[in-house]
Image (tube, rainbow, N blue to C red):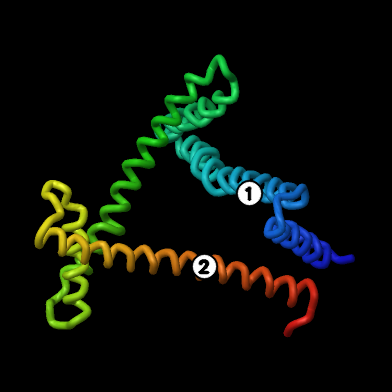
């Protein structure tokens, strides 16, 4: 039996095990779930070592030592120590040490995430909203933005004209939530179709 055939049968077995949850929670589903989580964790560790730690820390340290850039080489010891300190979380008496690198990582993530959100989402959204008011679609965008912002304006009670505008904003919000939910459902259905195609095409060649 070739490796591809073994892999196909193994993938089909795990797929059916996951589908068995549609009946009810069972040991077969839990076993497949544990295998999935374990493989994901193992893949994440290997990915972090192969594409982050080894090239950016080990190889860079060797390269800087080879070029006799001792300051650039030994400054890499700091992130290495922070990474090792993070592993101390598994030792109860030394758990407090791991809080420093974790807080440092969360701070960097928050800073980078804030800049990425502003540059990659907020500013393009503003620029894309400020369109010439020459078409019906652009007018709808303006109405949606103004009414939605009015709904989130809580410094004034939503009565009279403000209440009417806020209720129109609720309609736009619901449409946005519906579109987002529909997109999520489409993505999940696409994954489901892919698994059925694997089962009935690759595993059981019932369809061509």
Q: Residue 40 carries which label?
A: 1
Density class for disc 1 (Cα within 10 Å; few <14, some 14-19, many ≥20) is few
Image coordinates of residue 94 in percent, x first then y, are 54, 17
Q: Distance between the residues labelled 2 and 1?
A: 21 Å
Q: Which of 57 and 142 is in front in this view?
A: 142
Q: Which residue lies furthest to the right in this view?
A: 1
Density class for disc 2 (Cα within 10 Å; few <14, some 14-19, many ≥20) is few
On screen, residue 24 above or below 83? below
Q: Which mark is residue 187?
A: 2
Q: Residue 99 carries which label?
A: none
Q: In this view, does 156 lie to the left or right of 119?
A: left
Q: Is mark 2 on a helix, strand or loop?
A: helix
Residue, x 77% and y 47% (percent of image)?
Answer: 27
Residue, x 54% and y 41% (percent of image)?
Answer: 53
Q: In this view, does 156 lie to the left or right of 49?
A: left
Residue, x 63% and y 71% (percent of image)?
Answer: 194
The quadrant in which residue 158 appears is bottom left
Image coordinates of residue 54 in percent, x first then y, are 56, 42
On screen, residue 141 above or below 126? below
Q: Is residue 169 left or right of residue 60?
A: left
Q: Which of 67 and 31 is in front in this view?
A: 31
Q: Nearer the viewer, residue 50 or 205?
A: 205
Image coordinates of residue 68 in percent, x first then y, are 45, 35
On screen, residue 76 above or below 153? above
Q: Residue furthest bottom?
A: 208
* Mark earlier in primary sequence (2, 1): 1
Q: How many numbered callouts?
A: 2
Image coordinates of residue 154 in percent, x first then y, are 17, 48
Q: Which of 185 and 63 is in front in this view?
A: 185
Q: Is residue 92 left or right of residue 16?
A: left
Q: Quadrant of the N terminus?
A: bottom right
Q: What element carries label 1?
A: helix
């Amino acid at each position: 039996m070739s490796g591809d055939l073994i892999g196909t049968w193994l993938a089909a077995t795990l797929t059916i095990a996951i589908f068995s949850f549609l009946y009810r929670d069972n040991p077969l589903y839990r076993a497949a779930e544990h295998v999935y989580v374990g493989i994901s964790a193992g893949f994440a560790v290997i990915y972090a070592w192969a594409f982050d730690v080894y090239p950016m820390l080990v190889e860079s340290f060797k390269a800087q030592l080879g070029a006799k850039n001792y300051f650039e080489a030994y400054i890499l010891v700091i992130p290495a120590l922070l990474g090792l300190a993070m592993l101390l979380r598994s030792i109860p008496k030394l758990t407090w040490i791991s809080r420093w690198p974790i807080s440092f990582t969360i701070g960097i993530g928050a800073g980078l995430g804030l800049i990425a959100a502003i540059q990659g989402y907020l500013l393009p959204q503003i620029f894309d909203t400020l369109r010439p008011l020459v078409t019906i679609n652009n007018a709808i965008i303006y109405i949606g933005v103004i009414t939605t912002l009015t709904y989130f304006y809580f410094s004034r009670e939503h009565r009279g004209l403000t209440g009417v505008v806020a209720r129109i904003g609720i309609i736009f919000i619901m449409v946005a939530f519906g579109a987002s939910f529909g997109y999520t459902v489409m993505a999940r259905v696409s994954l489901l179709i892919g698994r059925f195609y694997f089962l009935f095409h690759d595993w059981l060649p019932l369809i061509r």
